[in-house]
Image (tube, grey):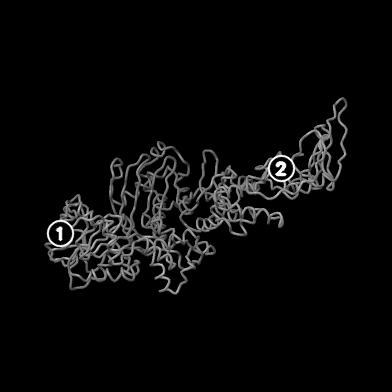
Amino acid sequence: MTDQSGLPTSSPSGNLAIPQSAPPKIDHTGMSDAAPSNDTGAAPSVIAPPSSPSVLGTTSAPSVPAISLTPMEAVQSTEPAPDLQAVSANLAEMASASAPVPSTAPGAVSPQTPEVSPPAPAPSIQPPGEIPGVPSTSTSSLANMLVQKGYITDKQYQDLLIEQASSGKSVETLIDEKHLVKETDMTKAKAAFYNLPYINLAETGASPEAISQIPESVARRYQILPFAIDKQNQQLSVAMKNPLDLSAIDFVEKKTGYKLLPHFATPTEIERMITERYAQSLSSEVNAALKETGQTSTPTRQEANAVFSREVVREAPITKIVETILGFAVKSRASDIHIEPQEDRTRVRYRIDGILTERLILPRSVHEAVISRIKILSDMKIDEKRIPQDGRFTFMAEGQEVDLRISSLPTAFGEKIVMRLLKKNATVPTLGELGLSDRALKAVESAIKIPHGIILVTGPTGSGKTTTLYSILHKINTPKVNIVTLEDPIEYQMPGINQVQINPQAGLTFASGLRSLLRQDPNIIMVGEIRDTETASLAVQASLTGHLVFSTLHTNSAAGALPRLLDMEVEPFLLASSLTMVMAQRVLRRINQDYKEEFTPEPSVVADVKSVLGPLYKQWCVQNNKDPEKMVLYRASQNRPENQPEYLGRIAIFEVLPVTEEISRMILERKSATEIEDASIQKNGMLLMKQDGYIKALEGITTVEEVLRVAEV
């Protein structure tokens, strides 16, 4: 018998109803309590009593125990999946009992009944995929996938099967109770097994229109979060804790009028994002502004360009959208805003603590108006869309004055805008707050006391080099010295320091500006970046004439700066006598210090940390009264409030290379960066960035994952 959905139902007795003229079917427990009917005129069903085996035709066969399946599990599994012990019990029962053989149809030849073999011993539990003749249930198949992906071992799976037989709990429930598999890994495995997509909500922007379709109360009740909407096809993409919940999907579809496209997402992430996206004003305010403009549809790119006009740019809703985007950036401590056109939408991404995060999706139809509004504020040409442009303006938000540097770039789908946020009243951090400590901090403090020479800070773009130089200048800034800087752009305004903004269009470059600065009677000079041979030569000459010069260079390590300067045709004897110190740095995220927890890392992580630190690990354990055999690391607490992020703030990791007599000799001999680095480690005890990062991970400041993200070579 089947219900209205076409799925088989069970009999009240809980055993399988097996017609004589058809193979047995799996029943759904709890879907119907009515006895099977005989609507098709077939032979009536025979319900086998619990104490006797079921038979089919004249062939004696083992009865299949009733299998309790949820509605969605029945859709996924179309074959019976009996428990091993139940099958063994049935086989033994059949061997000791003789079943009646029903008569065959008139004229039919009755086949001979095969002899019943002696009872076989219960089959032993075997590793996944090696249990012959027994089809897997959906749970054990999911467990098989977990074994194949290496999330659990064969031994753990065998133990789970034994415990399942004794406790009656599903394998999946046991895995959750024992925390054998990470939540993210389990969710991805479920998505792959059930052939449904997986979505990482942390990397997916919020669509204000999609969020407005489902009330927060419904989202919390069913643990469902909309993230994209397709009005043309009447489809709503949602992340769900359980995409197999047909009743929830049916309810939301009726409430919204859209066909749902369910995705798997981790339950913790769904709960956190529901709180974040329904609580934050970004989505709701932008959605309200979109309704005012009437631009909530998703037209083609040609249609979007056609509806654009100067009147649209001046509309209050467009202004409100831009203000909301900027206000959220200030509130969330973002350093950059990316407004990027795509074929059918416009996405807004924020760089928060160094990581780009997609937070907002806008209809393609308002892209031109939003871009033009920003270009008007930045005093850029709104009708020029073929070439890149630069601009700037000031914005007030949260009681803070923020200077924004705007850059436009023509792309295949329209103009992309990137805005760099520079807070004018931001305080300059100290060297200790940046992350310098112990020997590295002492080396820097000693080097900046020397009244001449060059101090370089190296690293990729966005690694905090300029902030480190500002901290150093803030420390040595007194009325007794004349400090002049050449910057592009001026990120902090510091009292008592003469800061010069580079303007290449007017002919003011680092090289020409440095040449002019030398006539300003400076004691200390900061050059934003050494980009070419001329700037490098002028910096060396300035340091040799009694000036203290600070600058930055783009290299991956501290030792790598020396061959780079030699490649810029700086003479080795000049470089050896002028260079005082080279620092390399990266910036990584801090763990939320108010909500962190200890944990014991995996053996492979322990081995890696000990291998990288070497003897430094035991030294650190002695200094901090830790047991070297019991390594403890830290991570964000799983039970932290939903509005608290995993990481909060940033800190730098450093390697500091003082230029000693030994290093100067190696520069004269044009030694490689590797040889110079090895010599500095052996003679001066230099700490590498990765080592500094691992020590900060041991101290609970950051995580090993963050260190590997920025410092893995």
**At label 1, which amino acid type do we have?**
Phe
Which residue matches tag 2?
80
Quarter holding residue 295: top left
Along the line of sight, the residue nearer the viewer: 344 or 71: 71
Along the line of sight, the residue nearer the viewer: 99 or 490: 99
If you read the primary sequence from the N terminus, does the residue marked by circle 1 or circle 2 appear first? 2
Residue at the front extreme of this rendering? 118
Q: Which x, y percent locates residue 342?
A: 41, 42
With 533 as the anchor, is 614 left or right in this view? Answer: right
Quarter holding residue 107: top right
Whether residue 322 is situated above or below residue 413 in the rendered picture:
below
Who's the residue at 45% across and 50% down the image?
Answer: 360
Who's the residue at 65% across and 43% down the image?
Answer: 76
Q: Which x, y percent locates residue 242?
A: 61, 50
Q: Gap in Å between the C-alphas at discs 1 and 2?
A: 82 Å
With 121 as the anchor, is 299 left or right in this view? Answer: left
Q: Which x, y percent locates residue 442?
A: 29, 71
Q: Which x, y percent locates residue 547?
A: 16, 65
Element assignment for label 1: helix
Which residue matches tag 1?
573
